[in-house]
Every structure is written in structure tokens, then in C-alpha cells.
Amino acid sequence: MLKIRISSPKLQSQSERPAHRVAIIGGGYTGAILAKLLVERGLHDIDDVTVFEPRHRLGSGLAYDVEDIDVRLNVAAHRMRAIPGAPTAFLDWLQASGTLTVDPQAVTPEGIFARRRDFGRFMQAQLTPHLDSGAIRHVRQTVRAVERLNEQWRITGSGGALVLADILILATGHPCASKPAAIDRLDPLTAVRVTDVFAPDAFARIGRSDPILIVGSGLTALDALSRLEALGHDGKIMLVSRSGHMPRPHAGGGFSPFGDFRGTDLTSARKLLVKVRETIAAAKEQGIPWQSVFDALRQHAQDLWQGLPLHERQKFLHRLRRWYDVHRHRMPPQAAAVLERGQDMGCFTTKSGDLTSVIRDGDDLLAAFETRDGRTEFRCRHILLATGPDFRDYAAHQRFLLAMKREGLIQSDPLGLGLACDTAGRALSAAGTPNTSLFIAGPPARPAFGELTGVPEIATQAANLVRRIIRCCARETRTIIVSKSG
């Protein structure tokens, strides 16, 4: 067998078939920033970018496709860093577009906390020129099937669209909310009284004074509280979750990140916890809030995760994950004010426990859960699910992903974080082999990165992934293998 390496400059296409086509499944923030970077940075190497996204616009996804003006980002605008190479792009847009003029409540002592929908508008503005020029093609269909044919990807949409691509990126975002077993066991008549907070009609049937049970106590639950207050709701609300922990507030004062977490000896969950506590104590001595320590920790979270052995990652997820989340994903000041008002008025209560049953009792629902103090019941009219996305067996959440899994093209992460991939974002097959034309981007790639939920981390991963794709498409040499006959 003879291998020959020859020059292979990109030639002018002699046919209508483009040489390097990229398809992206998912048009939330992750898919949108990938598409933007591909057309802007791959001008001479990428011929076609197609995004499958059933929503009307790109860049919003589930998180930012909200019309409720009361739901806000939990990160200050100057920290969003949504556009690689332009860290102040979102803040600049807020000021130039006049958005802050019509939303003065966004400005707080802790920073500018804009509405979620305004970030969606910002991303739409970023993509509009490319959509208008045809550089990005938006297919408003869900994906029905993905097949591998002759070294190409064949993507079939629910409306009959058919796209062939050389490179496929799965940017499928967050799956649906997890459900306690007690909810899954409900009969149909009872189940209709249980609604996901992100459902379009989640609050439509809630009466002004109806008592409500919110399952979950994270940022999604706080979004629900903000929305209910805006609607004038004055009934009793109980929040129940296993840990009972709620997101912590932001700190004012404009402090910079504090602490150095680059040590190579942080190879266990326990060592990491000790280091964080020691750093918080050192910060306190200097009058620096603990939030600055977690800001520094966030900067190195991916490296720390990748340095943990598998069994230590399991320990972290089992013992420290919720503790980390409530300090890392902090509540916007506006939501903190809503929570404080409700608690002062006696409208909100929180419980730590497991929901064990829900039964109908006339017009009410009687929810029971086990707490450390024993069995507790709460009578309500509606139950809102704010449990967060269920990443367990991620590939099972969409039919085309399940089919790809069955074919061995992808695999769900054994830790329940998303889809298995390497640190380059390449999907790992059932055999553990990285696929050089299939990439995982955004939250589903958390198995390799750990911290990959916030916009800045996703933006960094997207920039690195686009750089890799462009480098692959622009190769100046290729290898031809000649087999000797006979």
C-alpha cells in the first residue's frame, strides 16, 4: 500500500454541489452563535450553513423565547460575553437600542440585569444580516431523522426538508424538565393540573388567590415567583425540593474574581471543597465577598472537571453539585426582591423533601411529601414544575437522537450529563471513537467540560469548535491511498 500526500488547494466548484456544508440541529443561543461564527470566520472555507430550529427566530431557544417581561437574566449584562471577540456586545446593544430606556428596572446596584427576551432580541439582531443575505439558512422544522450516507449527513425535517451536510453539529440544548415519580403516576385528569413553568399557558388558568405548589427551588422556580407576582397573585405558594437550597444573591461593589484554582493537586471533590472554603475565608479577611471566589472558580471550572477522575466526578455530582449550583447560578436582584417581599408577607414557604403523592380532592390537589420531620401535606389548586432539565439518557429525549444512538453514532453519558464527546467537541461513538464530522455543542457537551451552561462558556466552546471545523475544511494537503492489485 502506497500513501501519497499532494497539495490540495480549495478549487472553484465545478458543479452546484458545495464542497463544505455544515448543518446545525438546534437554533437556540448555541446554534445561533455557531452559525454566526461559521459564516463570518469561514468565509472562504464554509459554503453553506443550515440551522434546523422550529421556533420563529434563531438565538432564543427555550431560555430566551419568553414574552414575559418579568423574567430576567441571572447574570449582569457586562458578564454575558455572548460574542467571542466582542465581550461588551450585549451591553453595547442594550444601550444603543434604547432597551434600557424602556426598562429602567434593569439597572441595579449589582449591575444591569436585562430581561431574558431582550437577550433573544439581541441574538436575533446578530443573525438578521446573515439570514437576509442567505449566508445562514433557517429551516423551521424539527428533525425527524439523521442518516450517514457516503460520508455525508442526510437530515430530514418534519416538514419534508432534506439537507445534505459534510459536518453535523448537535446543538440540541436542554431536554424537558425532570419529573418526580409521583407526577409520572398521575391519572390524566389530575395530570392536567401539573404544568411545566416554561409551557406557553403555564399561568393561564391560575386564579389570583389559588394556592400553588412549585416543585423545585432553583432559578426556574424564581422565574415562576416573579411571573406570579407580576400577575397580582396573592395566594399561598410552597416551594419543595430535595435539598431545599435556593440560589444565592449577587454581591454589589464590582469586586473582581478572587482566588487561584489552577493547582494540579485539586484531583478530588474533597480537595476542591477544602480549597474553596480556604479561599472564601481568605477573601473574608480582606472584605471580599464569597461571590468573587466563585467567579474565580468558574473561570477554571472546566480544567478542574477534566482533572477529576471518573469516580471523583461521581462524588462531586452526588455530594456537591447542588451546593455548587446555588452559589454559581445566582438569582437576579429583581427576583431576590420578589422572594423577600413574599417571605415578609408570609406568602412563600419552602420545604426540603420528596414529593410522594398527589391526589384530587374536589377542586383541590392534595400533595404529600416526606421531609426530615416526617410526612407533610399541602393543599393547592395547581402544581408548577420547576425541576430543571432531565439530562439522564439524553439521547432518549428526541427520536432522531435515539435512532442515532441505536446505530452506534452517539452515546448518552453514563453520568447523566448529556452526550459523550471529547474536549474537541467530537461525538464519541458506541465504541468510544471520536467522529471527525459530528460535533456536540452547548449543554449536551457537559460530560467533557463540566461547566457548560452559561453563555460565556458556550461562546468559548463555540469559537474553539468553529476554529477546528474551519481548519479541517481548509486543509492544504490530503492523503491518497493506492492499493496494489493482486
Image (tube, rainbow, N blue to C red):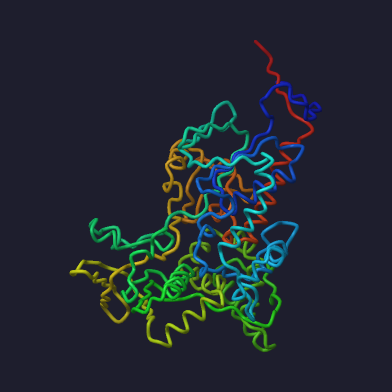
Residue at (72, 46) in percent of width and height: 467
| Vertical arrangement, residue 170 with respect to residue 118, above or below | above
Q: Where is residue 22 in the image (x, y as percent from the top left)?
A: 63, 38
Which quarter of the figure has residue 249?
bottom right
Q: Is residue 120 left or right of residue 474?
A: left
Q: Where is residue 34 in the image (x, y as percent from the top left)?
A: 65, 48
Residue at (49, 51) in percent of width and height: 413
Tally the numbered discs: 0
In the foreground, 97 or 276 = 97
| Vertical arrangement, residue 208 with respect to residue 169, above or below | below
| Vertical arrangement, residue 283 with respect to residue 322, above or below | below
Q: Is residue 63 left or right of residue 130?
A: left
Q: Where is residue 341 in the image (x, y as percent from the top left)?
A: 46, 84
Residue at (66, 49) in percent of width and height: 127
Which quarter of the figure has residue 109?
bottom right
In the foreground, 394 or 435 = 394
In the foreground, 66 or 318 = 66
Q: Is residue 148 left or right of residue 262?
A: left
Quadrant the N terminus occupies: top right
Q: Is residue 69 visible?
A: yes
Quadrant the C terminus occupies: top right
Which quarter of the figure has residue 375?
bottom left
Q: In this view, does 169 lie to the left or right of 141?
A: right
| Vertical arrangement, residue 265 with respect to residue 23, above or below | below
In the foreground, 224 or 298 = 224
Q: Can residue 435 be seen in this view?
A: no
Q: Residue furthest left?
A: 362
Q: Position of residue 50 (x, y in %)?
A: 60, 39
